[in-house]
Image (cartoon, grey):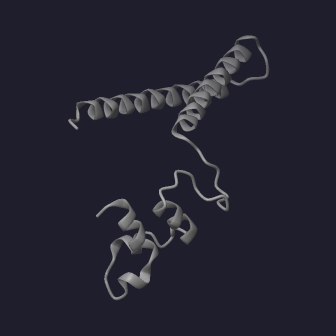
C-alpha cells in the first residue's frame, strides 16, 4: 500500500465502513482535511493557502537547528565570561548553560552522522 492510499483510508471512513482499519484508528487525532487531500492527489508540493501552519523546508529546519546550537554555545560562553569577571552569574547557571550547549552540540553531531549514513545508503542503491 502506497502513502496516498493509506492517506485515503485514514480520511475516508465511508470506504472502509465495517472494516477494522488500524490506520484510521491511529489517525483519528491527525485527520487530513479534504483540501489537503486534493492537493496531495494533484501532486502539489506545497500545502493549500488556507493552511495556517508555516511551511518549513528541510534546509530551513537544519539551518534553524544549527543556529539554535550556535546560540546556546554563545550563551554558555557569555555565562562563563560573566562568572569569571565577577558579574551576577551563579556557578550553577554557568554549568547548566554549558551542559545545554554540550548536549545540543552532541545531538547535532548525531543528526549529521545519521544524515551522512542515509546519504551513503542512498548512493549505494542501484537504480
Figure quadrant of residue 122: top left
Q: In the image shown, does 57 or 83 lie closer to the viewer?
A: 57
Position in image of residue 10 (x %, y %): 42, 72
Q: Residue at 61% of width from left, 59% of height from top?
A: 48
Q: In the image shown, does 98 or 50 lie closer to the viewer?
A: 50
Q: Residue furthest bottom?
A: 18
Circle count: 0
Position in image of residue 52 (x %, y %): 67, 58
Q: Residue at 20% of width from left, 35% of height from top?
A: 126
Q: In the image shown, does 22 or 15 lie closer to the viewer?
A: 15
Q: Residue furthest left?
A: 126
Position in image of residue 90 (x %, y %): 71, 25
Q: Residue at 36% of width from left, 82% of height from top?
A: 16
Quarter occupied by the N terminus: bottom left
Asked if residue 100 is positioned above or below residue 47 in the image, the reply reads: above
Asked if residue 25 is positioned above or below residue 45 in the image, the reply reads: below
Position in image of residue 121 (x %, y %): 27, 33
Figure quadrant of residue 72: top right
Quarter occupied by the C terminus: top left
Asked if residue 33 is positioned above or below residue 98 in the image, the reply reads: below
Indicate left or right for 80 with 66 as reference. Answer: right
Asked if residue 18 is positioned above or below residue 64 in the image, the reply reads: below
Q: In the image shown, does 4 or 83 lie closer to the viewer?
A: 4
Q: Which residue lies furthest to the right in this view?
A: 87
Q: Which residue lies furthest to the front in this view?
A: 42
Q: Residue at 42% of width from left, 28% of height from top?
A: 112
Amino acid at each position: 500500500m502506497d502513502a496516498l492510499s493509506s492517506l485515503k483510508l485514514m480520511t475516508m471512513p465511508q470506504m472502509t465502513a465495517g472494516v477494522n482499519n488500524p490506520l484510521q484508528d491511529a489517525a483519528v487525532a491527525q485527520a487530513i482535511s479534504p483540501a489537503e487531500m486534493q492537493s496531495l492527489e494533484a501532486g502539489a508540493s506545497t500545502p493549500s493557502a488556507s493552511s495556517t501552519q508555516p511551511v518549513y523546508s528541510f534546509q530551513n529546519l537544519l539551518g534553524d537547528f544549527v543556529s539554535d546550537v550556535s546560540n546556546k554555545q554563545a550563551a554558555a560562553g557569555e555565562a562563563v565570561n560573566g562568572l569569571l569577571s565577577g558579574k551576577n552569574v551563579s556557578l550553577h547557571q554557568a554549568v547548566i548553560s554549558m551542559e545545554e550547549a554540550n548536549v545540543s552540540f552532541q545531538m547535532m553531531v548525531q543528526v549529521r552522522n545519521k544524515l551522512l549514513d542515509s546519504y551513503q545508503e542512498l548512493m549505494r542503491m542501484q537504480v
